[in-house]
Amino acid sequence: MGERLAAARGNRQRVILPAVVAAEVITGGQSDAGVYRVMKRLIPEPITLDLAAQAGRLRERAGSARRKKRDLTVDAIVAAVAIARAPSVVLTTDADDLRLLTEGHDVRVIGI
C-alpha cells in the first residue's frame, strides 16, 4: 500500500479515506501502529448525511442484484464517496462489491 500511496503522490493525486474505513481496519491491536502511519498520509472524508443517503440508495440497489445477502453498508459508503469525487479510483479487497455499487459511474475499482 505504501508503494501505491507514493505513486499517487508522485502523480499529484489526492488519496481520500472515508472515515468509516478506519472502523474496518483499526483493531486495538499492535498492527494499528502501521494503520495510523498510513492514515496520517491520507485525506479523511467525513460522512455527511448526503453521503449516507447516497450510500443507502446504492446499498439497496446493489442488494437487490446480489444472490447472497450480506451487509454492504461500509462498501456503499466508500462507493458514495468515490462517486462524489469522480472520476476516481478505489483500491479495495471487496472489488466485486465495489464494482456492483459503482456501476454506471466514473469510478475505477482495483482489487488488492
Image (tube, rainbow, N blue to C red):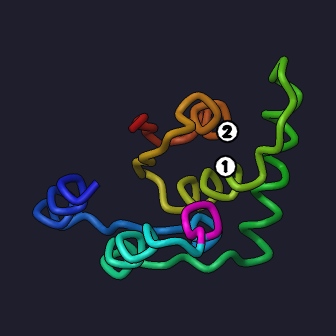
In contact (CB < 8 Å): disc 1 and disc 2: yes
Q: Amino acid at mark 2?
A: Leu
Q: Quadrant of residue 41?
A: bottom left
Which amino acid is tagged 1? Asp
Q: Position of residue 34 (x, y in %)?
A: 35, 70
At label 2, counting other C-alpha atoms closer than 10 Å, the crowd grade (few under 14, some 14-19, many 20 or more) is many
Q: Is residue 66 above or below residue 14?
A: above
The quarter of the picture where the N terminus appears is: bottom left
Judge left or right: residue 102 versus residue 37: right
**Residue at 62 percent of width and 61 percent of height:** 24
Numbered label tally: 2
Q: Position of residue 86 (x, y in %)?
A: 47, 54
Closer to us: 3 or 87:
3
Q: Position of residue 40 (x, y in %)?
A: 35, 82
Classify mark 1: residues with Cα within 10 Å, few (<14), some (14-19) or many (20+).
Answer: many
**Residue 71 relative to residue 20: left or right:** right
Instruction: Tell me: 54 left or right of 16.
Output: right
Give the mark, 1 or 2, whose residue is nearer the N terminus: 1
Dot 1: element: helix
Q: Name the residue rendered at 84%, 54% in the picture.
A: 56
Taking the magenta stretch, the answer to whether it contains residue 95 is no
Query: Residue 74 occupies which quadrant of the picture?
Result: bottom right
Residue 29 located left or right of residue 87: right
Q: Which residue is mark 1?
A: 75
The residue where tag 2 is placed is 101
Give the Cα separation between the discs numbered 1 and 2.
8 Å
